[in-house]
Image (cartoon, rainbow, N blue to C red):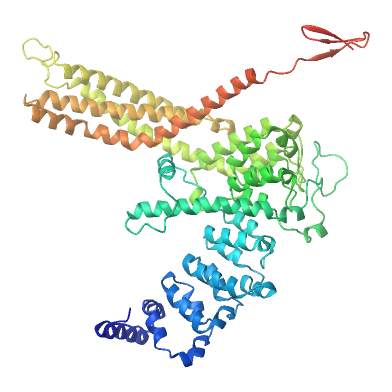
Amino acid sequence: MALTEADDLRVRSELYEALICGEEARVIEICAGIPKELLDMVPMHDSHKLTWQNSGGNTILHEASFNNKTVEAAADMIARAPMLLGMTNRLGETALFTAAISGITKIFKLLHREVLRTTQGPVLRNFLQRDDKSTILHKAILSRNYWMAHEIAVKHPHLINENDCDEMTPLQLLSVNPPEFGPKRFFKRMIYKVIDADFEETNRMFPWLKKMKKEKHQCEWAMKLVKVLVKDDTSWQMTESLVKKGRSKVHSYGRSQSIGMAEQELNMMKPVTPLLLATIHGCIEIVEEILKVYPQAIDHIDHDGRNILCLAILHRRIEIIDLMDKMKIQKLRVRRKADNYGNTLLHLVAEKQDKAIEDLKGPSLVLQEDTLLFKRIREMCKPVDTLRLNSKGKTAEEVFFDNNNKLRSDAKEWMSENAKNCSIVAVLIATVAFAAAYTVPGGPDSKTGHLVLKNKPSFLIFTIADAISLSSSLTSVIIFLNIVTSSFRFKDFEKSLFQKLHLGLTLLIISVTMMMVAFAATLILTINSGRKSTDITLYTVSFFPVIIFLFTYIRFYRQVGGAIYRAFKQMTDATLSRYRSPKPKLWQYNRHSRHQTVYGSRLLV
C-alpha cells in the first residue's frame, strides 16, 4: 500500500533527522518500514542498481534478509534482479547465508525456496558454505532456530559432517551450545503438555502464552534436530577409543618417569567427540541419544585420556553421573580408566573445573557436595583405587585434602558466622519469652493473687506458645554453640554440621512462630470487643506476621523436605533391589571330591 502525502512527509522528516544525527540504526529501521515503496522508486530499466554493494559487500537483498517484514520486498527484488541470490559479501556469504545467521524464519523460507528452484549441482555449495568453511547449518544452530537447522539438515544431509573453521561438526557445535529441551519446573511442564507448539498464529494471545508456545516449539525441534544429527554424524569415529596411555601406581618406589602423555603426542590433538562435549556442558539429552544410537562411543576419551565418567565428575554433571550409575555393565568399563596423568575417578573429584559465576553457592554447601561426591565415587570404584598414586605421587585423598583446604577454611568461617548470628537472635527471643512469662496478659487479681484471664481459651494458647518459644530458642542456642565449637573436619561437612544447622534453624523458626502466636493471643485477650467483624479483623492482623513468616521459609523447608525424600527413596530402592535381584547361590569346590556343592543342594559334575 502506497504512503499518503502526510505519511510521506512524516517519513521524510524522520529520515532526514536520523541522517543528520548519524543514527544508522534509526535509518535502517525507517527504511525497513517502507521497503516496497523504496523499490517502486527504482524504474524497471534501472534494476541493475539493486545489485550495488555497500562497503561490506552486502547487497540490498542481504540487508532484507535480517527482517521478516521485508519478505514481500525481497521477493520483488529477486524477480527484478535474480542475480542477487548468488551475490556474496566480503565474507563470502550469500543472502541465504545471512538469513541463517539471523535465524529469521520467513525470509529464510523464501530465499531457500528460490535457491533450490534456480540452482542445482555443485554450484549449490556456494549458497550453503562460506569462505571459512562454516555452513548455514552451523549458523542456524548458533542462531538457535532449531526448526531452520532441522530443515537444513534434512534437505542437505551432506552438511551434517562438514567442519567449520574450528573443525567442529554441527553436532559438536550443538553439544557446546546445548539448547533447552524442556522446562525444569513442575507447573511449567504441566502447561507444556496442554498447549500447542504452533506459535505462528498467536497474534491475539496473551504475551506469556505466546512466549511459552514459542519455547515449546524450540524444545520440540531441538530434540528432532539432535536425532537427525546423531544418526548421521560420524565425527565420533575419528576420535580415539579407550587406550591405556597413562597408568597409576599404588606406591612411590621404582623408576622415576612421567606417567602422562609424551610431549610430541600433545601436539597431535584430534577433535573431541560430541558425546564428551555434551558431557562437559551437561546436556543429558544429547548424551542419552548418542549412547542409544552408538553405545560403543562410551569408550572414547579426550586428549587427556578422560572418558565420559571422568569428565562428568570433573565438571560436576551429576545427571550424567546418575546415568552412568544406572548403566551397570558400562560403568564397570569406564570406572577403571586412569587419565594420562595417572588420575583415577577419585583424583578427579578434587580436580574439579570452576563453574560459571551464577552457579556459585556458599562455601559450606560446595564443600558438602564435593565431600558427598567423593564418598559416592569411592563406593563406585574398586578398593585399590583409594591407594593409587597419580603422576605427582599423591593418592586421591591427599589431592582432595590439599585442593580443598582453603574451601574448608571458608566453609568453617561461613558456618561459624551463621551459627553465631543465629545464636544472638535465639538469645533475644528467649529473653522476650522469659519476660512474657512473668508479665502475663491481664495480670494477677489484686485480692486473690490468681490470674484474671486464666480461664480464657486464648490464655492457654498464650501459655503453651510462650513455653514452646522459650524452650525451642534455648535448645537452638545449645545447638548453635555446638556448631561453633566443632572441629570442622572434612567428614563433618557430609551430614553432621548441616543436620545441626538445619535443626537449629528449625527450632529458631519455631520459637519465632510461637512468639508471634503468643503475641496474637495477647492481643485477642486484651482487646477483644465481642463484635464478630472486629474480632475477625483482629485475628487477621494478629496472625498476619505468622503467615508472612511461614511463606518466607517455605522454600527452605521444601528443599530440606526434598533432600529427605530423595534420601528415603534411595534407601527404599536399595532395599527393594536386594529382593528383586537376589544374589546367585555361592559355589564351593572340594578338590578331594568329584562333586561340586551348592549351598542347600548337591550337584554331580
Who's the residue at 22% across and 34% down the image?
A: 544
Is residue 492 at all visible to an observer of this figure? yes
- Which one is in front, 320 or 474? 320
Q: How many marks?
A: 0
Q: Is residue 121 left or right of residue 603?
A: left
Q: Residue furthest bottom?
A: 45
User: Where residue 474 sits in the image (x, y, percent)?
Assistant: 35, 24
Q: Residue furthest front?
A: 117
Q: Is residue 422 left or right of residue 49?
A: left
User: Where residue 136 sits in the image (x, y, percent)?
Assistant: 60, 67
- Which one is in front, 215 or 474? 215
Q: Is residue 96 above or below residue 188?
A: below
Who's the residue at 64% across and 54% down the image?
A: 229
User: Where residue 298 sits in the image (x, y, percent)?
Assistant: 71, 44
Is residue 57 at all visible to an observer of this figure? no
Q: Is residue 603 above or below residue 1?
A: above
Q: Is residue 485 left or right of residue 97?
A: left
